[in-house]
Amino acid sequence: MTSEEAAAARPRQDEQPVTARPRQGEEPAARPRQHGDIVLAAAIAMIAVQLVWRFDFIRRTYFRQDDFTFIARGLEHGLTWDYLMRVDYGHLMPGPFAIHWAMGRAGVYNDVLAHLVTLGLLAAAAFALLRLLRLLFGTRPAILVPLGFYLLTPLLVSSLSWWAVVIETLPFQIALAMALGSQVLHARTGRFRHALAVAAWAVFAMVFFVKAPFILVLAFVLTIGWFPGARRRAGAWLLYLAVVAGYAVVFFRQLFTSVQLTNDTVRPAFPDPGVAVSFAWKLLSAALVPGALGGPWQWYPISEDYAIAAAPRALAWAALGVAVVAVGVSLWYRRRAWLAWLTLLGYFVLADVVPVMIGRIVQLGPDLGGQELRYVSSTAMLLAVVIGLAYIPVLGEPDPWRRPAPGPRRLPRVRAALRYAWVPVAAAFTAGSVWTAVAYARMPLGDHVKSYVATGRAALARAPINAVILDAHVPARVVLPLFFRDYALVSRVLGPVAPNPVTWTRRLTGPVANPLAFDDAGRLRPVDIQGMTIPQRGGCTPVSSREKRFRLPAAVPDGEWTVQVGYLNPTPSTIAVRLGGAVTTVPAGKDFGWTFATVDGGGSDVGIRTTDGRTVCVGEIRLGVPRPAANGTPTPLQPVSP
């Protein structure tokens, strides 16, 4: 903290608390400073403990779902404007895209680096909040309460388990606290350089998170509400307006022109009003309020490495009751507490509810989306500030209290009750937060996905050079094919870690020798055509330019089928494989071997003929779907432990 910031954070002489007369030999002038030093040391110790506690959780996480998509896309593109400025389903995030681009070139799936970055961002966010609290309220013991809330809140838990969410939300939270701190300095000094700092931090946040423009709105509300006598200059507000307008132009242009994974452009639309209201209420009552009070206490896993809030109904209603009481008490005593809570509510509706409501709620539904804690994780920073504004007088705030001090007889008892009322609340919040975090950590988290990637890496290291590998979708626990389409293919997920060149194929075509496929554990196995088999009497059946029909044991519906044809040929030839009305032509080599034909058709028989007039001897025919052979020897023999 600079000398100017330290001066702004230090209570002015007329704001120093009244203390008892010092005893003989004491140095009363040193007390406030010593008092502040103790608070500052306690705050730093709390941050350090939080980082140690969070590290034990973060080190067990791994990349998940769209992390793989973003890293693969970064490997496919240069660091260009088009790559960075693509709006991904409503998110303009050139900063995260740049980080994914760099991550792909720093070990591809370097989870150790990701964990270090996460811890660094957490530390920066905590110290940014501490700076803001000191600027707002001074270095007094009361600031440890909102700081402690931020350090412990379960609102951050699920987002910390997802790398893509971490590098969006934590830089935003850092920028939010730093920008508001600079706005406090601007309000007190009127110096334009502090306004430039506010705008710079807002632009920094815009690089990472779509909610960033609200930082400047919050700066305006903070100044109007708590610094009515501030030295306001029109230049600062014009600067903020220009930053928001510029961002809006860029954002909406990219929003309507960016092509999504579905090869469509975004068409924002509001859902049915009933769905919108249901989602907003669910997100408030099941996610934000329980999370703000140490919940949700229970989780509903939607995969092995992620879960959404599942607060027990009784506890959710109890949390709402406690929230009402907490808000009511602050409104009873603090003159501007109403503005603090109104600011939080407005931010929740405009920044948390509306973007999801427009972009994703139709796909997720109000219940599933309303229990998603990561939608309100970035609100944790603002909530900590609001708690402070609702209960602690800002330095220099005129007439902060609504109620006069109690009478002389009741003064000691009431003052003591008010001073220590936060202790049981803080104890309950701490216990609930720890319980909630431990409950989330009971899941496997990234163990299974990390094992899949490590096993795939080992399998590719042992695969023959230029081996032909079937390019199928990875298991849904790694990347969901329904959402990420071709970016859920093995070639996109495991291809970047292959140390030797291999050949990826979506369809088996022609005489492929020893094709391989990945099983669900990430091991390579020989390909097996799972379906039905047509054996040949006498070993093989001669086939010439006149089609020979081979009846199937059962008819197959129309679809994509792979036909494996064994042969014994004196010379190479070309055969046409027919299934229903669909025909595919493939080569058949010399001597003994097999060839593959992928046919889009259906029927009760397979027709085979040569196209060059030669005769081939057709052996066993298999029709079905290529899969890793269950009885084939896997490589490696056992999955790699995470």
Image (spheres, rainbow, N blue to C red):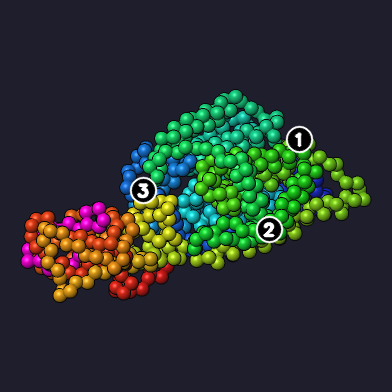
**At which x and y percent is residue 465?**
21, 63
Pointer 1 residue: 398
For the point 14% across and 68% down, the residue is 541
User: In terms of secondary structure, where does tag 2 sit?
Assistant: helix
| Drawn side of residue 183 relative to residue 519, left or right | right
**At which x and y percent is residue 565?**
20, 65
Question: What segment is highlighted magenta in the picture?
Answer: 565-583
Q: Nearer the viewer, residue 314 or 340?
A: 314
Report whether residue 113 is seen.
no
User: In terms of secondary structure, where does tag 1 sit?
Assistant: loop
Q: Nearer the viewer, mark 3 or mark 1?
A: 3
Give, as a three-letter code, the residue at label 1.
Answer: Pro
Give, as a three-letter code, the residue at label 2.
Answer: Arg
Report whether residue 97 is seen.
yes
For the point 50% across and 51% down, the residue is 166
Q: Is residue 138 magenta?
A: no
The first of marks 3 and 1 along the sequence is 3
Give, as a three-letter code, the residue at label 3.
Answer: Arg
Question: Is the N terminus in the top left, top right, bottom left or bottom right quadrant?
Answer: top right
| Drawn side of residue 256 relative to residue 417, left or right | left
Pointer 3 residue: 73
Magenta highlight: main SS: strand
Q: Nearer the viewer, residue 179 or 344?
A: 344
**At which x and y percent is residue 480?**
43, 55
